[in-house]
Image (spheres, grey):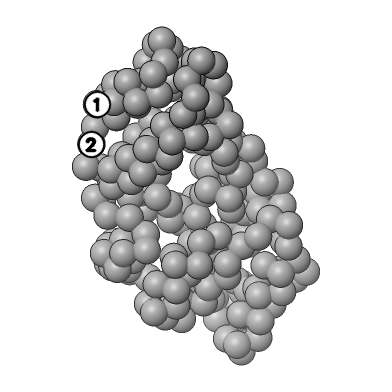
């Protein structure tokens, strides 16, 4: 697949696009429940319910409404675990697996000079830790992180903040996310959007080709 979208040369007009990358299930697969289930004592019969409560509370963490330390203490009590805060953090951070295909795409787009921006619902336990844990994030020119700006996708405020902060031109912005609701808001803001499925990576490459054709 040819991604020469950023032209250079004395006679060529240079045009580069901005690509917004979600992190979870686009760059890094993740599974909270498997990692945290191991912290719950075996004699507790309601592990699924406890994990569900944790998942619901995660929105408060990712929107910045609760501090990481407070969330950790609440989570330890909710899980009924004897684990330490350090053990919880280790489990909370063990959830990720890189997706090689999208990281290869990041490298190629970076080499071509396109502007890459992270666009993620994320929390203070994972960020900025993931930048040290997984190589490649240095290729990105910026980041929109939910817990830092106080609003999550798919709310309009998240997209509005990004457009203002990075002076995004919607028709020159390609947005990759795995969740339909996030994609729907992206389309409302005028981005060219792709709902990513790591099992159908070729579909992303096909949409890049369509996007290139639409800009000619």
Q: Is residue 114 left or right of residue 155?
A: right
Q: Quadrant of the N terminus?
A: bottom right
Q: Position of residue 19 (x, y in %)?
A: 52, 64
**Mark 1, secondary structure of its residue:** helix
In the image, residue 110 above or below residue 47: below
Q: Nearer the viewer, residue 147 or 165?
A: 147
Q: Is residue 144 left or right of residue 212?
A: left
Query: Residue 180, can we see it?
Result: yes
- Total of numbered circles in the picture? 2
Mark 1 crowd level (few <14, some 14–19, many ≥20, 10 Å Cα): few
Mark 2 crowd level (few <14, some 14–19, many ≥20, 10 Å Cα): some
Q: Nearer the viewer, residue 43 or 33?
A: 43
**Mark 2, secondary structure of its residue:** loop
In the image, residue 203 above or below residue 126: below
Residue 197, quarter of the rendered image:
bottom right
Q: Position of residue 135 (x, y in %)?
A: 59, 36
Tag 2 near tag 1, CB within 8 Å: yes
Q: Residue drawn 28% across and 47% down?
A: 63
Q: Residue furthest right?
A: 1
Which numbered circle lies on residue 70? Answer: 1
In the image, residue 170 above or below residue 93: below
Which numbered circle lies on residue 66? Answer: 2
Q: Position of residue 111 (x, y in %)?
A: 63, 56
Q: Residue drawn 44% across and 65% down?
A: 182
Query: Residue 126, can we see it?
Result: no
Q: Quadrant of the C terminus?
A: bottom right
Q: Nearer the viewer, residue 91 or 17?
A: 91
Residue 67, quarter of the rendered image:
top left
Q: Position of residue 157 (x, y in %)?
A: 26, 64
As measured in the structure, the alpha-carbon distance from the residue carrying label 2 to the one carrying label 1 is 7 Å
């Amino acid at each position: 697949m040819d991604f020469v979208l950023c032209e250079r040369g004395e006679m060529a007009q240079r045009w580069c696009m901005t690509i917004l990358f979600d992190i979870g299930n686009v760059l890094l697969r993740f599974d909270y429940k498997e990692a945290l289930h191991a912290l719950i004592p075996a004699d507790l019969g309601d592990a699924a319910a406890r994990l569900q409560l944790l998942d619901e509370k995660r929105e408060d963490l990712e929107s910045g409404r609760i501090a990481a330390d407070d969330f950790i203490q609440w989570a330890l009590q909710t899980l009924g675990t004897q684990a330490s805060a350090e053990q919880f953090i280790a489990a909370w951070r063990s959830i990720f697996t890189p997706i090689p295909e999208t990281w290869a795409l990041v490298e190629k787009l970076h080499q071509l000079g396109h502007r890459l921006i992270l666009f993620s619902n994320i929390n203070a336990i994972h960020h900025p830790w993931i930048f040290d844990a997984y190589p490649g994030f240095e290729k990105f020119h910026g980041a929109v992180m939910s817990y830092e700006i106080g609003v999550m996708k798919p709310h309009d405020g998240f997209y509005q903040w990004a457009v203002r902060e990075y002076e995004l031109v919607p028709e020159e912005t390609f947005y990759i996310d795995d969740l339909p609701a996030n994609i729907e808001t992206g389309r409302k803001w005028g981005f060219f959007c792709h709902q990513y499925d790591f099992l159908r990576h070729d579909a992303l490459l096909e949409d890049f080709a369509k996007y290139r054709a639409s800009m000619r």
